[in-house]
Image: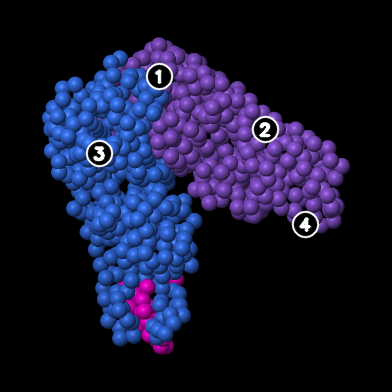
Chain colours: A blue, B purple
């Protein structure tokens, strides 16, 4: 069979990795795909800088539009990232009847509905395994491997930067700011780390996972997002003493009232496998009604792990080149006409357990006041720990683990606790999930 | 589109689970597959016993051949297990031009080459996700999700019975025989547990995984197999003290000299995620050259987890019903003409690290004799621990961890150690893998 011709948009870290992997494993990939896969052209912003990979045999251009309009090219691989110009390039490539493989989570999370509609109109595929959790084939697992299940919930460590920071804080008792600086020096965090540490990147990925798990539209704007910048070494230590680790999780859950979509730091039992996923590694835990819990673990970023997903998508596209466009795996796992607009719950309506940390005066009766307020709001307590006052301080740290409560109810209770004259400052709140 | 019609062979545990899952999730599955999937007929050995599931709307028959020859049926799902009559039924179904989904690891491991050849001849598919690791979509991950990689090695906990027994031994310090009896009472182990505890079942699954990881023929006869019946509570305790857990692993590795295929109890570092996979759960760790290590975890057996894989296979087959048979994912991941008959190494040629336990007289010079023999065979030692003699005994247990050594070399060294007059009985040997 004649070779499949690829045009690459972007020769940065992932683009370079993709070229390297496709060249190194060319014969292995052809053994699988049944035909050669050739990168015939690639675009890069700057053509004269030293290349990240060997580009022998690849036509280089500074103009990505040259690639999306090249009639010789079968599949366009978009590895530029961001929205401008990636969005326009992808839509033009689809318009030109080309299949698209992309690692662009922001594009899919924010504009996927439009991109997929265009792809359907043109009878071509958009594959995006690399957009979520790097090299872990989680899109494939959810969309095809678990297709017999009603997915009940999923919870993922889907931002390597945050997991690296939280792992360092846990292993070495270090503080957030200090570890963030190290992560930046190591290249694990950007100069402006907001996207990662404030949970936005994880929310892009969660948007995609939730959509293919439940067959709902992509709706990034409805994700509740809370990052890890407020987590202190103290919280990590107290959590550990109680048998929990703190991880930034993206959680999607189907309840009788609607869908929960949330990204936030979370206490999880230390004995759970996912609690032991450390450093920059990612993992997604999926609970299906038939299969029970399943977990998928691997590198969530990096040149070659991401390239692994890109190449798998290319091979998948090659395999459907001769298939009936109406009988492919749908982009969002469910048939376009079967996407259900199940309401997404506002965070105030979500129920979770909680870790609460407060500063109390060292006086009799303070705990009684706090527990009475919780009882009045029907909030039951799993554990209370009162610590020694830190040196020189007159306030005692009090840690409470409380059972599941609706956010709205907890907000009221916390406001009352904070109004107590014996309580200093605000109550620190971190959600807790048993993931059982 | 018109419904796809399924004929089920076998209404035991997995057959019943498959009926339940297909009925319960019918609307969810149709939302995904784009058409209804109906079980129209099922065969069972006994028709009058109380059914494990609601069989309303399903034509029941005692004759499975009625199903494989029924022109109305599109896909035959074989859930009888074993070779006779499953093998003949599958071949007849293929001959009749029907696609086949099977959970039968023995059939695929022993006769897969012939089954797939027949399927190719007839232009139909044989899907077997449920044959390995129950509900974990590991076949799909290896065959499609990691298709950009050269797979370097894989290591799996792929027998739930053994993992349950080893977990109990580790958690509670119990002995093998006692836990085996409990596993039998719980239904986790068969009355004749040989297949599970002696590693044969794991070897069937490893045969399949290795074939699709490396693109080699299915060759069960070349797997080195060693079960867990020789593991004692003492070994589990000593391993733990050294920072290791003992798991029954199926390991396939590609080396410059050939392929390693082996099932045996293995010490693995306790900090590895896979070392913390407990109870009846399964997990497979796959190392690809691009993606690095990835891990897949879930239930390896049971009615609905296995049904989850069976239904996913059915949906996959439905999606390729209109595709070009020559451009599907190949049965063994690699194109039939590209299967490479790379030699499988005999166990004597395999290199691994080892845990050795020996009984030594409590005399000066004994350790010197042992270490001299190891040094003479160029075997380097990572750790030596000498324990107190058990009550009333005069022999001291000595535990050694040794670095990688070729089996043949170790056999000679061990023979010399066992010939020392100061060493009692035989040397206990358990392989050790760092899985790094």
Q: Nearer the viewer, mark 1 or mark 2?
A: 2
Q: Is residue B231 visible?
A: no
In magenta stretch: residue A370? yes
In magenta stretch: residue A364? yes
Q: Which mark is residue B388?
A: 4
Q: Identify the mark nearer the N-term, 4 or 2.
A: 4
- Please name the residue shown 34% across and 60% down the image: A180
Q: Secondary structure at mark 1?
A: loop
Q: At which x and y percent is residue A160? A: 36, 51
User: Range of the magenta residues?
Assistant: A357-383
Q: Identify the mark nearer the N-term, 1 or 4.
A: 1
- Marks 1 and 4 sit apart, C-alpha to C-alpha, by 58 Å
Query: Residue beneath label 2, please?
Result: B407
Q: Nearer the viewer, mark 2 or mark 3?
A: 3
Q: Secondary structure at mark 2?
A: helix
Task: Identify the chain of the residue marked 1, using the numbered disc in the image.
Answer: B
**Whether residue B425 is situated above or below residue B316 in the rendered picture:** below
Query: Residue beneath label 3, please?
Result: A49
Q: Nearer the viewer, mark 1 or mark 3?
A: 3
Nearest to the observer: residue A314 or residue B306: A314
Q: At which x and y percent is residue B9? A: 45, 24
- Marks 1 and 3 sit apart, C-alpha to C-alpha, by 39 Å
Total number of numbered discs in the rendering: 4
Dots 1 and 3: beta carbons under 8 Å? no
Dots 3 and 4: beta carbons under 8 Å? no
Do callouts 1 and 4 point to residues on the same chain? yes
Q: Residues within 10 Å of mark 1 (few under 14, many from 20)?
A: many
Do callouts 2 and 3 point to residues on the same chain? no
Do callouts 1 and 3 point to residues on the same chain? no
Do callouts 4 and 2 point to residues on the same chain? yes
- Marks 4 and 2 sit apart, C-alpha to C-alpha, by 29 Å
């Amino acid at each position: 069979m004649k070779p499949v011709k690829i045009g690459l948009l972007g020769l940065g870290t992932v683009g370079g990795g993709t070229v390297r992997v496709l060249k190194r494993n060319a014969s292995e990939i052809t053994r699988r795909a049944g035909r050669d896969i050739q990168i015939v052209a690639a675009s890069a912003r700057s053509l004269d800088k030293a290349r990240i990979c060997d580009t022998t045999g690849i036509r280089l251009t500074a103009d990505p539009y040259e690639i999306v309009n090249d009639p010789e090219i079968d599949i366009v691989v978009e590895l530029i990232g961001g929205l401008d110009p990636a969005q326009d390039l992808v839509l033009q490539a689809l318009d030109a009847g080309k299949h698209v493989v992309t690692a662009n989570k922001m594009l899919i999370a924010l504009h996927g509905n439009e991109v997929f509609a265009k792809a359907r109109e043109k009878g071509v595929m958009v594959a995006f395994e690399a957009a979520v959790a790097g090299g872990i084939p989680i899109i494939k697992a959810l969309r095809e491997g678990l297709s017999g299940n009603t997915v009940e919930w999923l919870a993922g460590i889907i931002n390597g930067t945050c997991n690296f920071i939280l792992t360092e804080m846990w292993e070495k008792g270090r503080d957030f700011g200090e570890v963030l600086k190290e992560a930046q020096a190591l290249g694990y965090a950007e100069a402006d780390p907001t996207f990662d540490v404030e949970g936005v990147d994880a929310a892009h990925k969660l948007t995609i996972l939730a959509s293919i798990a439940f067959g709902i539209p992509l709706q990034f704007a409805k994700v509740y997002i809370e990052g890890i910048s407020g987590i202190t070494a103290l919280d990590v230590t107290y959590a550990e003493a109680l048998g929990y680790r703190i991880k930034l999780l993206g959680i999607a859950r189907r309840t009788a009232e609607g869908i929960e979509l949330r990204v936030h730091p979370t206490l999880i039992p230390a004995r759970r496998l996912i609690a032991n996923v450390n450093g920059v590694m990612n993992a997604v835990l999926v609970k299906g009604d038939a299969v029970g819990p399943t977990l998928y673990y691997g590198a969530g970023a990096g040149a070659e792990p991401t390239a692994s997903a890109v190449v798998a998508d290319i091979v998948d596209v090659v395999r459907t080149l001769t298939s009936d466009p109406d009988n492919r795996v749908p982009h969002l796992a469910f048939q376009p006409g079967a996407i259900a607009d199940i309401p997404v719950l506002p965070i105030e309506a979500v129920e979770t357990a909680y870790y609460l940390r407060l500063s109390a005066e060292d006086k009799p009766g303070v705990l009684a006041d706090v527990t009475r307020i919780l009882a009045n709001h029907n909030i039951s307590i799993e554990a209370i720990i009162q610590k020694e006052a830190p040196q020189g301080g007159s306030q005692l740290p009090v840690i409470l683990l409380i059972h599941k409560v609706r956010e709205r109810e907890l907000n009221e209770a916390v406001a009352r606790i904070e109004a107590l004259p014996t309580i200093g400052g605000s109550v620190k709140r971190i959600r807790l999930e048993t993931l059982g």
